[in-house]
Image: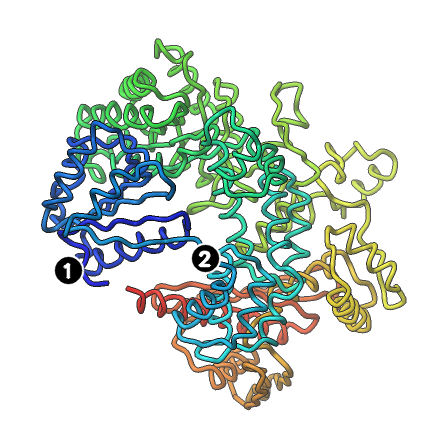
Amino acid sequence: MRAEDVLGRVILVTGKEEFLGARTVDEVRAVVRAHDPEAELADSAAADLTLASLGEMAAPSLFSAVRCVVVRGLENLPEESVEGLLGYAAAPVEDVALVLVHGGGQKGSGVLTKLRKLKTVTEHRSEELKPSEFPSFVANEVRRYGATMEREAADVLVESIGRDLRSLAAAAHQLTNDFPGERISEEQVRRYFGGRAEAKSFAVADAAFTGRDRAALEELRWALDAGTAPVLITSAFAGSARGLARMVSAPRGMRDVDLAREVGVPPWKLRTLRDQARGWTDAGLARAIPADIVRAGEAVKFARRGRIHTFVSTSPIHLAHQMRKTEDEVLEIILKTVAQARDLVEDVEWSAMDATRTPIDYLCRCVEAAIRVGATTINLPDTVGYATPEEYRAMFRSVRERVPNSDKAVFSVHCHNDLGLAVGNSLAGLEGGARQIECTINGIGERAGNAALEEIVMAIKTRADVLPYETSIDTTQLVRASKLVAGATHFPVQYNKAIVGRNAFAHESGIHQDGMLKHQQTYEIMTPESVGVGKTSLVMGKHSGRNAFRTKLRELGYELGENAFEDAFNRFKALADRKKHVYDEDIEALVDEEIAHAHDRMKVVALQVIAGTSGPQSATLTLDIDGNQQTVHANGNGPVDAIFAAIHMLVPHTAKLELYQVHAVTEGTDAQAEVSVRLAEDGRMVTGRGADTDTMVASARAYVAALNKLMLKRQKTAKAEQLG
């Protein structure tokens, strides 16, 4: 597809196969952007299309004359708009690519017939595939990414995953990432996707969308351990979201058999979708720019309780140096964009960025205007972590007292931790009248982070005498959630972190220990169990058997298949031979590392290091790279430098080491070391982790893990560039 094939023409996308239709739309957009990187992209629903709105979307903007306009749901085009659309299609604007998407069926067939007669219209059909065509689809997807596949392998992939094209395309992409340029065999497909990977993926998605977080986490661990590719799990999430969106937007009063056909799921699946639809809320974040708000509205339009959250700066320093606008101009932006958002959804949140450095008179004017035109939630963030609790509390009270329509909105806090006051300010905001808190697990976030969810929740629960609020959060999941986030972000939790830190319930002082032995509440204001910390973690050793190990895994939230369990048990026994006591944290590190790196292309096989004061320090390293073992010897300025030099000899790269961090998984001289390595290359940044009782081995594993991720990112970038 070339620019001349789409610009000045109308692209008609028809058929019920949503994946193929979406791919055609993406290809048109990519061609337009390749022709002009500044090209404007617009998206609209046919049900809302008028001649005026079509003209507005097709008109050149201040930034570019080239545009790509996508109109979806052509079958819902109002009768009064048909003539205008046909008139435009007969003589389209030269620098505009108009894409019309029809979802299939008889509805709107009259418009299709007339469009097909026009010479300026090119039709791309996306019909549903026949059962015999799915293996060919898979083979074509593999060729799309530069590899080939045996016919038997394609058959096995379809059998394992099912006939969802998105899942099949994702699986093909995953295989070509793992075996670039190769001919993919049946054995390779069975190794990665045997055992109904689709079922495992959708079990995770179903549990998550129903709100069963604990079950979703357990299903996720089991699916990853069983070899389900992560991309299939994300694809399952997308599939569940699409099914849920179709169901909540379907006409009311339909029979189940008709509703199932409309949604595109078997009738038994409707009960699951109904359970998931209860209380499902989706929020789209958008700058105070009309185009952004349109995109946010498109993203949440199928949600049962969709929300658009739009924000704009209000402080003098932001207006002068970032916005370069006057107070009145920003006030006009608020009126227009909040009203625009309210036209799209009933639930609109508006944020005054840098509210705590905004003059109170002007802040009140902005809040009043936002509520007047439809904002239902007002967020007053401490964007730079500047406020003190007393100031923040007073700001909320003043705004709520001075703004006449403040009772028509819920007020929200959003605090940053630059001065270490994010949690205190959030609680002060509650006292000032706020009833929504925006916070993060472990306090992760921009710069010094945001207010920590776990600290706010436990403060409210523990000090109900002065904080009479409820959160409905299951606090026994706080530690588990903290570990999950720390592992996913590679940001370890500091030992003395409140609530979830390793030392949060540790007592070393003799006076403290004496008091604890006499009465627990002498030095603990909450129980470890209330946040998900077990009573003891010192229960495993070299004499522990399979049953004890399986029980411990279940206590920690792991459900492993037989093969994965045997592998984990063997690694546990090897660890127990090197450590007198194996703690819960050791087992978590052991299992998590195996799950994370099960499908890495490069793995550490053997390492021997020579270190000491006399030098030179050196490392002899053996890596398994795509099934081939290679060994090198390297010297360095210290043992770690020697190891990394050896890795560089085996895997040449230009990545720069941004972070090297070591911390002990548990206490004691025989503790496992967990090493984090962050690499940066051409704007790409990756982090790898490795754990072992030998810090040098852990360092090698962490560096290799980061390189595996970097290679994967390189491949994805290269293929994206090839696709335009």
Which residue lies under the disc numbered 1?
4
Q: Position of residue 162 (x, y in %)?
A: 57, 58
Q: Is residue 525 left or right of residue 643?
A: right
Q: Nearer the viewer, residue 549 or 97?
A: 97
Q: Position of residue 439 (x, y in %)?
A: 51, 36
Say whether marks 2 and 1 touch (CB < 8 Å).
Answer: no
Give amino acid for label 2: Leu
Q: Secondary structure at mark 1?
A: helix
| Figure check: 548 above or below 652 | above
Which label sits in the foreground, 2 or 1? 2
Q: Nearer the viewer, residue 142 or 504?
A: 142
Q: Secondary structure at mark 2?
A: loop
Q: Quadrant of the C terminus?
A: bottom left
Which residue lies under the disc numbered 2?
129
Give amino acid for label 1: Glu
Q: Nearer the viewer, residue 178 or 455?
A: 178
What is the C-alpha distance between the residues marked 2 and 1?
29 Å
